[in-house]
Image (cartoon, rainbow, N blue to C red):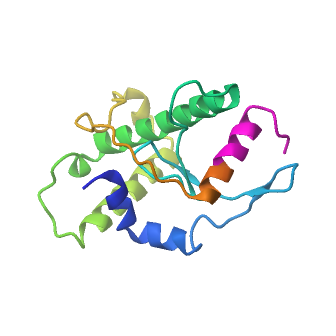
Amino acid sequence: MNDFLVLQNSDFFKLCEKGLRLNGKKLELSDGPEVGEYIIGDAGFPLLSWLVTPYQGKDLSDSKTEFNWQHSATEMVAQRALARLKDTWKIIQGAMWRPDKHRLPRIILVCCLLHNIVIDLEDVVWDEMPLCHQHDPSYKQQFCHFADQSGLILRDKLSQFLSGRLPP
């Protein structure tokens, strides 16, 4: 399945679409619009009001180029976190021993919880662990060309804000 189909079939997607997730405090920008909570995704995902993807194409304006740079930097943090998670908890790396699809989310959740506990305890083991920056070496970039209007507005406002052209 492609990335978007996996997301679209998740409960998280359904809850976000209904406004039941990513619905915390909003940032008010100087020209009136508010920016709510959102997650970032690569070009394989659609641009939505709660899922921000990079600008596509060449000859982007300075603010769009800056936005893409900051988006990419944030993506790298997420990729390093996933790489560390998968390196630490080998059970979620690659092909698992095929647990039934109802147990799999619980296994991943438990690994994430244990992972966060280790991070919170600032275990010295982290300093000794090798870090792989590529959590999925067989991944091939996918592209999604869908964008809803509220996602376009959100990304443009974020782009202006991050480039300093729109004060908070």
Residue 136 in picture, x, y percent from top left: 28, 38
Query: Is 97 situated left or right of 28 in this image?
Result: left
Residue 78, horizontal then vertical, whole percent: 47, 41
Quadrant location of the N terminus in the rendered image: bottom left
Q: Position of residue 22 (x, y in %)?
A: 60, 64
**Farthest residue in the left direction?**
97
Tell whether position 102 is magenta.
Answer: no
Asked whether 154 or 69 is in front, the reply is 154
Q: Nearer the viewer, residue 90 or 105?
A: 105
Q: Nearer the viewer, residue 65 or 130?
A: 65
Image location (x, y in percent) of residue 79: 42, 38
User: Residue at 11% across / 57% down in the picture?
Assistant: 97
Q: Does residue 69 appear left or right of residue 36 in this picture?
A: left
Image-based side of 95 in relation to 105, left or right: left
Residue at position x 61%, y 28% in the image: 60
Give yes or no for residue 156 being in the magenta stretch. Answer: yes
Residue 107 vertical position relative to residue 125 in the rendered view, above or below: below
Residue drawn at (59%, 72%) of the image: 19
Question: In the rendered structure, which segment of residues is drawn in magenta?
Answer: 155-168
Which residue is pictured at 15% across the width and 50% down the height?
Answer: 95
Quadrant the C terminus occupies: top right
How many circles with numbers are drawn on the protein?
A: 0
Corner quadrant of residue 73: top right
**Res. 49 image quadrant:** bottom right
